[in-house]
Image (spheres, grey):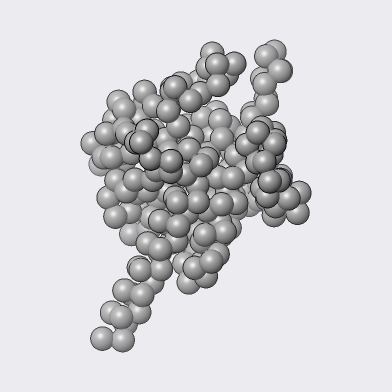
Amino acid sequence: MAKVLAVLSGGYTDEKNNYVTGWWAEELFAPAMELEKEGHTVGIATLLGGKPVVDPLSLSEDYDPEGKYKKLYESGLADKTTPLVDVKASDYDAILIVGGHGAMFDLAHSEELHNMINIVYELGGIVSAVCHGPAPLIYTKTKDGRPLLEGLDVTGYPNDKEPEEVRGLLPFSLEDELSRIGNYSKAEDQDQYAVWANERILTGRDPHSSELFGRELAKALTRRELEQEEKYFD
């Protein structure tokens, strides 16, 4: 079936303000489980490889009351990641950028990641991102120099949900930047929200939307596989 590359933040530490962040557990594990249910495989990469820093809040009882994602994290599933430089983008049918505030610091302006996103997209693959994961999509430009998300429907973590204690520590407002180049929406009336910008770009609003987001991506990849099989046998 399809191969998906999940890209995680390696982590970010602000010692002056005693602030540590990285990738968000639910936003990796929930979509990965939905993808694996459909028979797809998930590889994990970070900019530098190795064991990335998970946002500790994502493993707390407040955000993971059943301890499901903490258990998956402690099993070591995300302990070994491939450096992005060692990843061949054309091997993957989709890229999944995992959220967590860390993505705003190390992934957002990574030209290496921008190039990988473009390769996957130009080869007909799906580009997807959840919560703060759309941060690098904001700064990704197509080969003709236009923003990848220009004029498209997008979502991501909203300003009014950002914790007060981190607002002054973040490098930019995700909602403001997404609104600047795309048609941002947060669908406050929906418990979970994921939106297709077109048939190859999918974004999810927040951690609680991770399962829906993963299911949407998984089903889209399955449909594509079936369509390719039908064309092959026609």
Q: Dividing the picture into quarters, in which one does residue 184 lie?
A: top left
Please name the residue shown 57% across and 59% down the image: 33
Q: Nearer the viewer, residue 125 or 101?
A: 101
The quadrant of the rendering that contains the C terminus is: bottom left
Q: Nearer the viewer, residue 188 or 111?
A: 188
Please name the residue shown 51% across and 61% down the image: 35
Position of residue 226 measured from the top left corner of the image (x, y, whole percent): 36, 75
Position of residue 230 measured from the top left corner of the image (x, y, whole percent): 30, 80
Position of residue 38 measured from the top left corner of the image (x, y, whole percent): 49, 68
Position of residue 151 measured from the top left corner of the image (x, y, whole percent): 23, 36
Query: Looking at the image, is 191 positioned above or below residue 32?
Result: above
Query: Looking at the image, is 220 positioned above or below residue 53?
Result: below
* 4 to the left or right of 51: left
Q: Dividing the picture into quarters, in which one does residue 100 lie?
A: top right
Residue 184 shows up from this direction:
yes
* 139 to the left or right of 83: left
Please name the residue shown 54% across and 13% down the image: 168
* 232 to the left or right of 9: left
Q: Dividing the picture into quarters, in which one does residue 120 lie?
A: bottom left
Residue 204 shows up from this direction:
no
